[in-house]
Image (cartoon, rainbow, N blue to C red):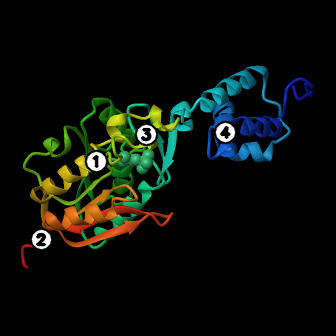
Amino acid sequence: MSAINAFLPCISALLTEASDDLSAASESPRLDAELLLAFVLQVPRSYLFSHPEKQPGKEAFAIFRDLVSRRGSGEPVAYITGRREFWSLDLVVNRHTLIPRPDTETLVANALDLIADDREPSILDLGTGSGAIALALAHERPDATVTATDTSAEAIALARYNGQRLAIGNIRFVRGNWFGAVPGQQFDLIVSNPPYVAANDPHLERADIRFEPIDALAAGSDGLDSIRHIVNAAPAFLRPGGWLAIEHGDRQGASVTRLLTGAGFEAVATVADLGGRDRVGCGRAIRADT
Ligand code: GLN
């Protein structure tokens, strides 16, 4: 079956053509084309580089063309393939949750630093979505107990499914609105990547972002509604000396620092993401012994 069919393009030609087609719609056209073709052929991406001369069959070719055209209309690759890698974990994603961003790995790294000296810490992730942050923390710290919450039943179902697939056991999933999911409980660390985009921000009109749930993105006229709520409510849900670490927009660093200080947090700091943009605000609840 290795005869060359003159009418079907080989992998390398398909990728070149598709990345040209996607150059207007995507900031990473070549990568998108590779992810989609690997998905259609059910092979690892590396296969595409080791077999550039292979000709996918007619059916695979047709499916690939269709997926490229969906991507060309803005649909994110992660929603097409149903997969996204985050903190080296292979997550299933769908339209009920935000697609995990590399920026959010900054929050995971910061959170791990904050609890580096704690043994068996209890961790709360508010608005877990696909479960990305909570699962990364639970995976890195098998001694921790992680509680992951979301107000969306679909999100909780997806996050729980990801936990099962990845066989991460030190985590539980609770549906509820912010702290409403964990009445009367206290934690050593609270993390969250809440919605923080201003409701009228033109960023929300971007073709791929429009496929994501607006509730996971936008939060009031200055984008700070959810962050304000979480920061102000958090002290009651933290053990003395416990930490809050929260993701925010790159121009919200000063506002979030002010909110944290105003709510009585100490050791307040802003952490930059890999692109050097302000991304995470954190602070420690007042310790009992001070
Ligand atoms: N950083 C995301 C974006 O700009 C927003 C994530 C969020 O609101 N939590 O699209």
Query: Comparing marks 2 and 3, which lies closer to the viewer?
Result: 3
| Residue pointed to by mark 2 | 286
Q: Earlier in the sequence, mark 2 or mark 3?
A: 3
Q: Earlier in the sequence, mark 1 or mark 3?
A: 1
How packed is label 1: few (under 14 Cα within 10 Å), some, or many (20 or more)?
many
Callout 4 secondary element: loop
- Give the CA separation, mark 4 to mark 3: 18 Å
Q: On the rendered image, what quadrant is the C terminus found in?
A: bottom left
Badges 1 and 3: C-beta atoms under 8 Å apart? no
Badges 2 and 1: C-beta atoms under 8 Å apart? no
- Kindly identify the amino acid type of the residue bearing the numbered disc 1: Ile
In the foreground, 68 or 56: 68
Ligand 1 neighbours mark 3 (CB distance < 8 Å):
no
| Residue pointed to by mark 1 | 171
Callout 2 secondary element: loop
Using the rendered image of the protein, determine whether residue 24 is visible from the camera's viewpoint.
Answer: yes
Could you say which disc has been placed on residue 24 in the image?
A: 4
- Kindly identify the amino acid type of the residue bearing the numbered disc 3: Leu
- Give the CA separation, mark 4 to mark 2: 51 Å
